[in-house]
Amino acid sequence: MTAPVKPVNMIRAVWQGEHRFDAGRVGKPQIRIDGHAETGPGPVDVLLTAVATCSGIDVVDILAKRHTPVAALEVEVVGERRAAHPRRLLAIDVTYHVTGAEVERVHAERAVALSLERYCSVSSSLAPDIVVRTVVVLNGERGEAVVAEIGR
């Protein structure tokens, strides 16, 4: 049996002069995207933000289902880009700063792995040759870096 197809996501980007666009779903909140990153994040910043927030939502939900809720979560993403055009992403380092009294490292790291392997549609949409490395910092203690297996 084939899984039902989700509706298409459609956004509109309206040029606001120079390298600025206001973008989002029609009739929904808009974000300013600025190629110079002066009045809003740049396009690649938005892509990295999408990876952080998509995966972050998964991590929070997965840990909540374990009845080990997250008290705080910060996700830092660093993208390494080619020097020459097109200046595409080559690698992404994602650090998850998880705070939660009852959250165990093994579960936090498994939540990150599940997000990137199975649930996060943004990371799964990245080019397959982009290396994604993750680290979980749990309650201030840094874990080991892991190369993520991205579900594609």
Image (spheres, helix red, strand yellow):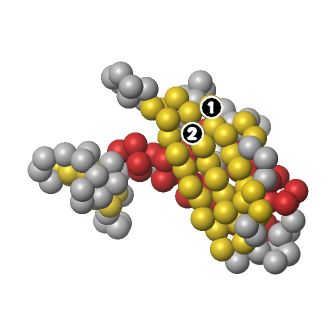
Where does the image place residue 113, in percent across and percent down from the top left? Answer: 76, 47
Q: At 70% across and 77% down in the image, what residue appears? A: 71
Q: Quadrant of residue 137?
A: bottom right
Say above or below: 125 vs 16.
above
Which numbered tag is attached to residue 92?
2
Q: Residues within 10 Å of mark 1 (few under 14, many from 20)?
A: some
What amino acid is labelled 2 in the image?
A: Ile
Q: Locate residue 27 relative to residue 21 in the image: left or right.
A: right
Where does the image place residue 38, in percent across and percent down from the top left? Answer: 24, 56
Q: At 85% across and 75% down in the image, what residue appears? A: 102
What amino acid is labelled 1 in the image?
A: Val
Where does the image place residue 60, in percent across and percent down from the top left? Answer: 70, 66
Q: At 43% across and 26% down in the image, what residue appears? A: 82
Q: Quadrant of the N terminus?
A: top right
Q: Which residue is farthest left?
A: 17
Which residue occupies the foreground of this view, 5 or 82? 82
Q: Quadrant of the C terminus?
A: top right
Reading the image, the residue beneath label 1 is 131
Q: Are marks 2 and 1 in contact (CB under 8 Å)?
A: yes
Q: Secondary structure at mark 1?
A: strand
Q: Secondary structure at mark 2?
A: strand
Say above or below: 139 vs 149.
below
Where does the image place residue 26, in percent across and percent down from the top left? Answer: 31, 59
Q: Residues within 10 Å of mark 2 (few under 14, many from 20)?
A: some
Q: Which residue is farthest front?
A: 141
Q: Locate residue 90 relative to residue 139 in the image: left or right.
A: left
Q: CA distance from mark 2 to mark 1?
A: 6 Å
Q: Is residue 76 visible?
A: yes
Q: Is residue 62 visible?
A: no
